[in-house]
Amino acid sequence: MTVIRTAAPTLRARNAARLVAQADAAAAAAPFESIPRIDIAPMLAGEPGGADRVAAELRAACLEVGFFYLTGHGVADSMVTDTFAIADSFFRKPQAEKAEISILNSAKMRGYTGMLEENTDPDNDGDLHEAFDMGLDLARDDPDAHGDTYGWGLNQWPDMPGFREQFVHCHTTLATLCRTLYEAFARSLDLDADHFTSNMTKPISELRVIRYPSQDTVEANVVGIGAHSDYDMFTVLATDDVSGLEVLNPAGEWIPVPPVAGAFIVNVGDLLQRLTNDLYRSAVHRVINVSGRDRYSMPYFSNIDPHTVVEVLESCITPTRPARYEPVTAGGYVEACMHESYGYSS
């Protein structure tokens, strides 16, 4: 395995406190050079002791790395490949047609993102990708679809047969998988297995498909997606067979996260790091595609209800480790981070 060694980047953050906390967490952890794998099949099958074994493995992965491969999940490969296929058909449409559903016209940040319109690392000049985002697909007559709450709104859809149906199917399938993962996360923190259930009546989880064109040469200020951490509770990521994802370890080394057939890649998000008082690591990662081919990925940003207050768990507070974060609402935090990435004023 090739380990790419660089000096740890100084991320000139708009949200400085968040990245200071990440740097502090990283400094306390041992460097890793690979990503662990967790087989969730024993938990899904209800095997004796299976849920506890998965929770223990998950805890170790979150404390040490913040990333892990998830196998044995039971989600059909065809769901991922079919979603990539219909997304590819959309991305091949004329730019003017795609721009009709631009995310920049959506107060709830739904729709199409063009090349360089998003910038996750403020030291860079934009992210070299295009994407389509959707959230919970509320009906037009749902009162929550027309309010000011971030995460509740109407999706923008292209005029393509089967597109909406495929994305909604994918969103629903991954939401079901994530409910099991929330149980595993709860168990890993010595909480009741259903700890998160009451905060998941209308979760603001978002599904995104991203196309990264290959770069002939890599410029320091323009890559597929710049160094960043995710804003949610956790992310479940599907990719095609093209490499490009890298995660930063505590020694300042960029560790490749190559695709594993049939596996999802799961990573801790900022809200889970806040909840655990920096015990679980929302690791910084990036994408650089120099493969000579387009790279497709599909992150499902799993989250809870937008009005839920996220505050440090009492079990993660000690006399020598007081609470490091003020309470925030899940929706408010994600909205602020998204606005920063797209250059909006808060």
Image (cartoon, grey):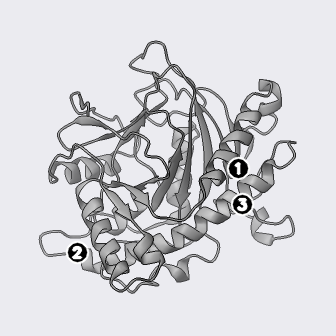
Q: Work out whether mark 3 precedes mark 2 in sequence or the reverse, and give the earlier one.
A: 3
At x 57% / y 61%, what residue is drawn?
75
Disc 2 is placed on an element classified as loop
Whether the residues at callouts 1 and 3 have beta carbons within 8 Å, the answer is no
Label 1 vs 2, first from the N-terminus: 1
Instruction: Give how far across and how far down residue 95 sits, in percent.
Output: 77, 25
Label whose residue precedes the other's in the sequence (1 or 3): 1
Number of numbered markers:
3
Residue 268 seen:
no
Between circles 1 and 3, the one closer to the viewer is 3
Regarding residue 339, the answer to whether it shows in the image is: yes
Looking at numbered disc 1 in the image, what kind of residue is underneath it?
Answer: Ala
Residue that carries the numbered disc 1 in the rendered image: 107
Give the residue pinned by disc 3: 169
Which residue is labeled 2 in the image? Answer: 317
Q: Is residue 41 left or right of residue 256?
A: right
Instruction: Looking at this view, name the residue that lies furthest to the left.
Output: 320
Amino acid type for the residue under numbered disc 3 = His
Residue 70, position as x, y percentages in the image: 42, 59
**Viewer-side residue, 206 vs 322:** 206
For disc 2, the neighbor class at 10 Å (few under 14, some 14 to 19, many from 20) is: some
Name the kind of residue labelled 2 in the image: Ile
Q: Residue at x 32, y 64 (%)?
A: 325
Circle 1 crowding by C-alpha within 10 Å: few under 14, some 14–19, many from 20: some
Residue 74 vs residue 54: left or right? right
Residue 337 place in picture, x, y as percent:
50, 48
